[in-house]
Amino acid sequence: MGVKDKPRYKVAVRRDAEDHSAWLVNVVGTPGAHTFGRSLAEAKRHGVEVVALWFDLEPEDFEIDWDIRLGELATTVKMARTAMAHAEADRRCRDDSVRALTDAGVSYRDIAELLGLSYQRIAQISRAS
């Protein structure tokens, strides 16, 4: 069975409104096909299991489209992901700058002084390139 031939199932996952330590899992459009998990990872594993059991399939024989419903947490998660993306871009810019200064013959100690980092950190960045 090719990848295009695999059936796809939409599975919704949301935090339990009453028990915030649980994630509720429902196969969309399939009443009765539901489970839960104590963590998001566990909920997703259980989601795969419920689809496999409900439709009598092996996990490698279907695909799941996850619909993670975060409710009031969605904004917080979006902000964190945006900040992480910016931080990664900033890290790359910093590392490129350290390499450029090193290539220009500036010492690790002088680069550290200019950038407000330790000379050990400058050496680590330079070695990583």
Image (spheres, helix red, strand yellow):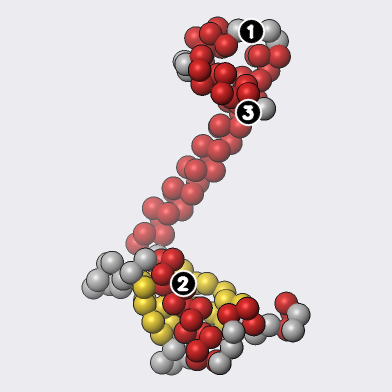
Tell which circle, 1 or 3, labels the residue nearer the N-terminal end: 1
> Which residue is label 1 attached to?
106
Contact (CB < 8 A) between labels 1 and 3?
no
Give the percent coordinates (x, y) of residue 12.
Answer: 46, 76
On the rendered structure, is 101 left or right of 5? left
Q: Quadrant of the N terminus?
A: bottom right
Q: What residue appears at the point 47 percent right and 73 percent down from the top-left corner?
A: 45
> Circle 3: is it few (<14), some (14-19), or many (20+) Cα within 10 Å?
few
Above or below 71: residue 85: above
Tell which circle, 3 or 2, labels the residue nearer the N-terminal end: 2
Residue type at the position of mark 3: Ala
Q: What residue appears at the point 55 percent right and 38 percent down from the top-left corner?
A: 88
> From mark 1 to mark 3, how far is it between C-alphas?
17 Å
Give the percent coordinates (x, y) of residue 44.
Answer: 46, 72
In front of the other: label 1 or label 3? 3
Q: Which residue lies furthest to the left in this view?
A: 18
> Which residue is label 3 attached to?
128
In front of the other: label 3 or label 2? 3
Give the percent coordinates (x, y) of residue 59.
Answer: 58, 80
Tell which circle, 2 or 1, labels the residue nearer the N-terminal end: 2
> Circle 2: is it few (<14), some (14-19), or many (20+) Cα within 10 Å?
many
Contact (CB < 8 A) between labels 3 and 2?
no
Contact (CB < 8 A) between labels 2 and 1?
no
> Which residue is label 2 attached to?
44
Above or below 2: residue 91: above
Residue type at the position of mark 2: Lys
Give the percent coordinates (x, y) of residue 63.
Answer: 61, 77
Q: What residue appears at the point 68 percent right and 7 percent down from the top-left corner?
A: 105
> From mark 2 to mark 1, how far is it between C-alphas?
51 Å
Residue type at the position of mark 1: Val
